[in-house]
Amino acid sequence: MALSVPVAPMAARNRRQIWSVGGGKGGIGKSLLTASLGFQLARMGKRVVLIDADLGGANLHTCLGLPGPERTLADFIQRRVERIEDVVVETGFSGLRLISGASDFLAAANIKHVQKVRVLNRIRALDVDVVLLDLGAGTSFNIIDFFLVSDVSILTVVPEPTSIENGYRFIKSALYRRLRGVAAHDGVRKIVDAALDPKNPLAIKTPFDLVALVEREDKDAVAAITREMAAFHPRFVLNQVRDATDVIIGHQLVAACARHLGVKAAYSGFVHYDDAVWQSVRRRRLFMVDAPTTPAAQEIRQLARTLLQGESLGLPW
Amino acid sequence: MIAVAERPDTHYAVLGLHPRASREQVEKAYRFCLEMYGEGALATYSLIGAEETEAARARINAAYEVLADPVRRREYDAAQGLASPAAPLLPFPVALPPLAPSAPAAAEAPVAAQAPSSVPPPPPDLARHLTGPELRKLRESRGVTLREIALVTKIGVRFLEYIEEDRVALLPAPVYLRGFLMEYGRAIGIDPRGTADAYMARLPPKA
């Protein structure tokens, strides 16, 4: 395995962590990745709760071989139950539990800020080691907000043009959303808002353009913006790789993020495409259990270790 | 990462390299960057336009042309203030003269004499005999760690240590050792064959 380099050490004191898995595009294995990563973290002794917030359809329970649960996150949001603990169900795997069925939660355009804060606070207060959030596809504000508040923000991509395009779009949206939060005043905020539109009249194409414009608008506001850029660390996981050339793409993504977006991303790991995984999915069984000796299962185990240690795969030279 | 590598405009930064990168690392980083900015490359096509891609490729080639050439690299390092007097970058590959000049080498001698004088001759004793500790000094002067060599050559760190400690009894059979030494030399950017010859010349013939 390649040299590992530390990226951003995770807060050591706060044992309770929120990890989120986003990706921008549907059908690239986010749910399966979330389920198997959660399974592995639980096997490593962590107490884990998976939360299904996939807009494309809540299906995390299917990945785990479970029937559709009776209670879902929606019951908590609509106050049909008082405590978030009441919608947590057992998965049958030791240490791994699930909050299911929030398919309409993050997609809802009318979700109120207070609701979001309430859910987030209750998630944070869960008595577990890791909360693992499946964000599903899309780059809506709600999805991105959960991505940004996470201690570990995982971005899934597959080595295909559409997925990587969406991945970059996701990173840009998340970054601009983050920068908007530290905008000193309306002048700066307007520039950040303009940047979100790819055809913006200010001709902002990259975060570097944005910084240059902010500098012209207000020299004192630049420090906060660049500090915020430097603190953003999305972590790439490359799914469904087929060969060594695909594996290298992860390193190229990190290099391209640094050079062209000014974002210090990490390459946390890759998972090979595997027919055995597909067959397990068909049988509604977790491949980590069904096919534990496959390269894919080994790579999930490696990925869990790398993420826990807050490292990035280093270039193989 | 040391401070100089943070400067985004150096040839090293363009290839994503440490200023002490070995010859082999330069080669690999160059190939990586070319692929990254290749025609329709997945990682960049949606981020930058054709013009910018072309410009990136041009910078990569310019960086490679300098860093792959020992003389030009040394001049560049000096001009950039990258060469620290405490750890002079050796020209590489260091031309170790043949141990026993063979006929063809002798025939080439006049040509060699006209080689650019900017390449200082290696210390004469290195030419014929190279001990483990001397090898280590050469390696350390280039800022290459054993672990880096191990990664590139797939030779275990333990064996590399034996080589540097002259622990002859623990070293593998001469045919393997020769291969190891050549890999070692290549990894730190000195003449592989010369390294193997100069090291092995001191070893007693195995019974």
Image (cartoon, helix red, strand yellow):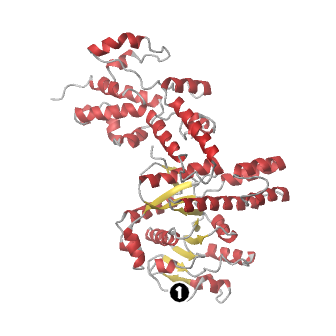
Residue A143 visible? The answer is yes
Q: Is residue B191 left or right of residue B76?
A: left
Pick out the residue farthest to the left. Answer: B207
Which quarter of the rendered picture does the C terminus of chain A lie within?
top left
Residue A295: x and y in percent read 38, 62
Pointer 1: what residue?
A69
Residue drawn at x 38%, y 41% is B150
Residue drawn at x 70%, y 75% is A116
Task: Give the vertical position of A198 relative to B180 (above or below).
Answer: below
Task: Give the vertical position of B167 relative to A114 (above or below).
Answer: above
- Decide: few, some or many residues near mark 1? Use Cα within 10 Å; few <14, some 14-19, many ≥20: some
Give the secondary structure at mark 1. Answer: loop
Which chain hosts label 1? Answer: A
Residue A269: x and y in percent read 48, 58
Between B111 and B1, the one lying in front of the other is B111
Residue drawn at x 29%, y 17% is B99
Between B47 and A176, the one lying in front of the other is B47
Q: Is residue A296 left or right of residue A98?
A: left
Residue A29: x and y in percent read 50, 69
Residue A224: x and y in percent read 75, 52
Task: Give the vertical position of A57 relative to B192 (above or below).
Answer: below
Residue B19 visible? The answer is no
Quadrant of residue A127 within the rendered picture: bottom right
Amino acid type of disc 1? Answer: Pro
